[in-house]
Amino acid sequence: MIRLLAFLIVVFALGLGFAWLADRPGDMVVTFNGYQYQVSLMVAAVAVVAVVAAVMIVWWLIKSLWNSPYTISRYFRVRRRDRGYQALSTGMIAAGAGDGALARKKTKEAAKLIRSDQEPLIHLLEAQASLLEGDHEGARQKFESMLDDPEMRLLGLRGLYLEAERLGDRNAARHYAGRAAAVAPQLAWAAESTLEELTARGDWDGALKLVDAQKSTRQIERDAANRRRAVLLTAKAQSLADSDPAAARTAALEANRLQPDFAPAAVAAAAALFKQNDVRKGSKILEAAWKAEPHPEIAELYTHARPGDAVFDRLNRAKRLQEMKKNHAESSMTVARAALDAQDLSTARREAEAAIRMDRREGAYLLLADIEEAETGDQGKVRQLLSKAVRAPRDPAWVADGVVSERWAPVSPVTGRLDAFEWRAPMERLGQLIDSRDEPDAPVVAIEVPARPEKPVDVIDHAASGDEATGKDAESREDHVTPVTAAAFAAVPADAEAVEPAEELARLPDDPGVDPDDEAEKSPRRFRLF
């Protein structure tokens, strides 16, 4: 556009000049070699312009002839390069589609038409073709050769990182990621792997700096960065709790400020404050976290904030937590534990039963079993509650990648991922068993056993044998158990007294069983099909 405007301006200026000369007539006399030439001023101007144009045309022709070899070679070179880029484009598409044969063919064609030092993508296409063909060793060599080229270094590190991940060599993968992060900290994959390496070494300060760099380069959002900082600061506070209480307190308070509802951060901050006898501020932190989401670690630390408190003082503090979060199973469990310690068994039983009504889980039944044993000592009821606890859903715990931990940890012990632990119920059991005593309306399904030929089985008359058995025979009969079969049922006389079958539950290895006296008091029940 600018060149077109300049051309129009020149033409317009020439037109104005000729018009100006046309309005002012005059003659121009030229004497040369004894001859005198007289022409009008207009003709002289036209002649001068024509001479200049002729000179320019002649110069262009001479220059074109002089540069014609270079122009011709450049034409063929550009044509060759276009063919090479076309082959490179086709090869990249084939590599993306998984066509290794076509990718290798186009790689060779592109390498012939384009110099590899001029186009780095040829190295990438060759490495991708090797990976598609299963030649991982050749691909690694190609990626290693890329490290010498500053333009290809990051690509080579990325390829070596992925190969190390494929082989399961996490140390090598983190090494390549660390080199890439040092050159280009904005790379997300390099920053994530380096973060895992730093957290695995316990370098919390280095991990915090990396998270700040990720936040400044907008790799992660502000909320995600604050969450990561809270996790790292909590881990730092836990590691410095014994060696440097002041630094631990500072880190824990900052973590709690970033994530007030993060239970580990609140517990770490409150524990650091309690060590410095700042019970009031620590209690406020725990109360705020409890209101957001009740957690047993918060309740445990809150009720034992002052080691010298009596059991009734701890019970009052537990009731204060319950007032902050009413109608919650964890609140009732907290009061029940404190009441059990204070030997207020009626309150403990009431709160434990309320917790079971709100959330039927293993810990509530175990707590109720402890209360039952402390109050009545009825081992039959205790075993019944323990049986219910075995079949109840498990209590929430810290779970990460299939690992269940009683304490929170900043990274997963399996994958090394940061902030992997979640507070939830472990998905270990396939499903909750149905307790017939808890579900009285469950349908009863009768199972009919088909009759089949059996060998004759003698029916043992326990009354008669009890009178006749003495000494060694009686002892052998007590140790011997006769299997009950369909034929045995068929052999029972018609006038025999009917006996209801007793319910038989599968006994766990650590279940001591039910006392015979307690078993006799239980009412007989029919079998249920679960």
Image: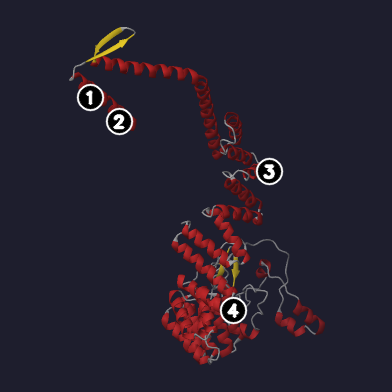
Camera-side residue: 184 or 348?
Answer: 184
Is residue 6 placed above or below 301 in the rendered structure?
above
SS class, disc 3: helix
Q: Amino acid at mark 4?
A: Leu
Tell which circle, 4 or 3, labels the residue nearer the N-terminal end.
3
Marks 3,1: beta carbons within 8 A: no
Q: Amino acid at mark 2?
A: Leu
Task: Find disc 3 in the rendering and name its residue.
Answer: 137
Task: Find disc 1 in the rendering and name its residue.
Answer: 16
Determine the CA span between mark 2 and mark 4.
95 Å
Mark 3 or mark 2, whichever is nearer to me? 2
Marks 4,1: beta carbons within 8 A: no
Camera-side residue: 426 or 249?
Answer: 249
Q: Residue furthest front?
A: 34
SS class, disc 4: helix
What is the number of the mark on residue 471? Answer: none
In what quadrant of the picture does the N terminus appear?
top left
Determine the CA span between mark 4 and mark 1.
111 Å
Residue 529 seen in this snapshot = no
Mark 4 or mark 3, whichever is nearer to me? 3
Task: Find disc 4 in the rendering and name its residue.
Answer: 386
Tell which circle, 2 or 4, labels the residue nearer the N-terminal end.
2
Determine the CA span between mark 3 and mark 2.
60 Å
Q: Residue furthest left?
A: 23
What is the number of the mark on residue 5? Answer: 2
Q: Is residue 460 left or right of residue 160?
A: right
Mark 3 or mark 1, whichever is nearer to me? 1
SS class, disc 1: helix
Residue 194 seen in this snapshot = yes
Tell which circle, 3 or 2, labels the residue nearer the N-terminal end.
2
